[in-house]
Each structure stands twice: as structure tokens, then as C-alpha cells.
Image (cartoon, rainbow, N blue to C red):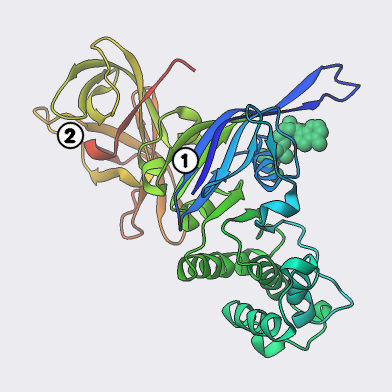
Amino acid sequence: MLQIDNLRKTFDGSRSERRSRVLAVDDLSLTAEEGQMFTLLGPSGCGKTTTLRCIAGLEHPDRGDITVGDRTLFSDERGIRLAANERGLGMVFQSYAIWPHMNVFKNAALPLEVLPRSRRLSKKEITARVERVLSVVQLDKLMDRPATNLSGGQQQRLALARALVMEPPLLLLDEPLSNLDAKLREEMRFELKRLQRELNITAVYVTHDQVEALAMSNKIAVMREGRIEQVGRPREIYERPSSRFVADFIGTSNFIDGTVESHETGDLYLVDTPHGKIRATSAADLPAGEKVAVSIRPEYVEVEKGAVPASDAVGRWSGVVETRAFLGESVDHVIRVGELEMRARCHPSLSFPPDTEVTITLQEKMCSLIPTDE
Ligand SMILES: Nc1ncnc2c1ncn2[C@@H]1O[C@H](COP(=O)(O)OP(=O)(O)O)[C@@H](O)[C@H]1O
Ligand SMILES: [Mg+2]
């Protein structure tokens, strides 16, 4: 549906930096399938907005190709560059501007009313479309209300309605929820996801919030310094981060340095670490002796009372509880294993006071290998 190949965008560096160019998007390629919510996730300044603006036609890329369906929107090689208003894409930005002197209906209708004469719809058609889209975002009861008398969440839905009324093949969303307060943001997450699924919209969603990305996306591309570091389904990104950057950025993780001892069956490896042996998975082909880090999330570190019996298995280590913190839905423990501090997130029914001797079990399927050369 959306295909981007080798997109590159640089900006003039500021005078004080005395740098020639800022590399905002660096050889980025991606494919979003029809009906997908495809999310660009990454820290501030990694190039998310610039990528979105290139798709929208608001920035002129240095090179690359951008195609939506069978229409090429931009290609430096083929000399194609459609203007933003010829691309027909829907856009919702963080600072969604609604028109204060118009009511809800007028706000949603405006994009249709300003179409060139050749493409303009009849008044009846406009009314039908606007009513339909307002009912989708559940603002149909408020059609006559001045737009300024809407709550933050309602204004956000109006901005969405205005983007949807054009029935765009692709919707571009740049941190559309970041101006809302925490509770509303969470509600809108579900609402936006529901709308996107119900209307089978293909969307590119930009956010720096990993929880939002995990909750809303079919696919996530984690970006770093203008490049895509990893693409995958939310669960893949979370459970199988391919680099330390991704593992760190998407929540907390334990990292255990070690060396590959042998490749067992499938994607399973036996890894030797200073704290004992452990099994972990990797899709990559790693030779024995390769230095790696094993990454495991705190919620997959199982904790039981008492030290490991002498004859025990791989992936089970003795440790001592250092601290714990009650977090309501869970109890976080810091457990010392030799030189290593492991974080374990337990169900609130399991809580071990400091100095308790415990056994931790690292589930092999939840341990992923990541390269250490970065
Ligand atoms: N108009 C601009 N002029 C100069 N530099 C820019 C401009 N827009 C973005 N940049 C730079 O490009 C990089 C990526 O920015 P941006 O795409 O806005 O990141 P994000 O949306 O991920 O926070 C940053 O280093 C930013 O300072
Ligand atoms: Mg941005």
C-alpha cells in the first residue's frame, strides 16, 4: 500500500553549529500493508516527523521513492514530485488546528468545500459525507456546537473527522494524542484504533511513546538517528529486540553479557555467562565464541524462595533480594546474582523482603540474544 525506498532528507545546519547539513532521514525504506496501522517509534529528533512530511509532500526529499497504491508520489530518479494537495492524503498533527469561528459541521465540511470546482461535490453529497464521518467519531450530536466549546478529546476527534472526510487512501498521524491529558490519551488510543480497524484505514502513526505504539500498531518501525533499527509486530519488538537500543527504548530489560557456547535446535542457543549457563533464542546465525548479550524483560524472570539445588538446570540461578518496590499491579525486585543485578517483576502475591535467598528462572523462550558490538 505504502512503499518507501531509500528515502533521504537533509536540512541546512544552523549557523552556530557550523555544520553543513543535518541528516534527518538516512536511507529509510519501509512497506505498510493495506489496513495496517504502521507506527514510526523513536526518541525525539530521530526523523519521524520529517519522514511523515516527506510522505505528505510538505518536504522535498533529497532522494528516494514514495508510492501509495499504484501512484508514485515522489521519485527523484523518475523526476516525479506531486504537490501536497495532489496527493490526497489525510493528516492529523499534534497541534491540530480547528477553526474557532465555525461550528463542528462546518469544520468537518471545509476540506470538501474548498476542492477545485472540477472535483467538488453537491451540497447534498457533502452533507451526507460529513454526517457519516461525524457519526463515526461520535460527534454527530454536537454538529451545531461552536468548535471552541469542545473538550480536548472532542477537538481531537474533530481533527480526525476532517482528515477522514476526504476518504484518503492513507492517513498520516503525527503524535495526535500528545496534547491530551493522560487519561484521555489512553481512551483515545482505543478509540482511534477501533476507528482505524472498523474503517479499514491504512495509517502511518508517529509517536515517541512506546506504550502507545505497542497498544495501537500492527507494525512498529523503531527509528534511531534517521534510520530504522527494527521493524516488527509489537510483540516481536517487545520480546525479541534485535539491539540494545530497541530493548532499552521499549521499556526496561535485563542484559547479561556472555559468549555463545553452541547452537542447539532451531533458533535456540546455549550461552555461557559469568553467572552460569543460559538458553536464549536468536534468528541470526551465530558461531560459537561470539560475544553476545542476553536480554530478558523483568516480567519473565521468575522468582522462588530458596537457593538452587546443586544439581539444577540451565537458566536457574541463585540470588539474593536487594530491594523491592510495591507498584500496585506488580512487585518489582532487584536481585543480586554475583556481580549482576537482575530486575524481576512479580505478581503482587509474590513479595520477597531484602536479604531473602531466592532462585530465579530465566525462561529460554523469553531470552533473546542481541549483538554487543554497538
Ligand atoms: N526545518 C528544519 N530545519 C533544520 N533541521 C530540521 C528541520 N526539521 C527537522 N530538523 C532536524 O532533523 C532531525 C529530525 O527531526 P524530526 O523529524 O522533527 O524528528 P522527530 O519527529 O523524530 O522528533 C532533527 O535533528 C531536527 O533538528
Ligand atoms: Mg516530531
In depth, the one of 312 and 351 nearer the eye is 312
Residue at 67%, 82% in the rendered image: 125
Residue at 31%, 60% in the rendered image: 349
Q: Is mark 1 within 8 Å of ligand 1?
A: no
Describe residue 242's horizontal placement relative to residue 167 as left or right: left
Residue at the spot of label 1:
252
Ligand 1 quarter of the rendering: top right
**Which of disc 1 and disc 2 is earlier in sequence?**
1
Query: Residue 289 at x, y = what percent?
Result: 27, 9
Amino acid type, mark 2: Val
Residue 308, label in figure = 2
Q: Secondary structure at mark 1?
A: loop
In depth, the one of 111 and 177 nearer the eye is 111
Query: Residue 92 at x, y = what percent?
Result: 69, 59
Residue at 21%, 29% in the rendered image: 267
Q: Residues within 10 Å of mark 1 (few under 14, many from 20)?
A: some
Spatial distance from mark 2 to mark 1, Cα to Cα? Answer: 26 Å
Query: Residue 215 at x, y = what percent?
Result: 47, 57
Camera sees residue 250? no
Q: Is mark 2 within 8 Å of ligand 1?
A: no
Amino acid type, mark 1: Thr
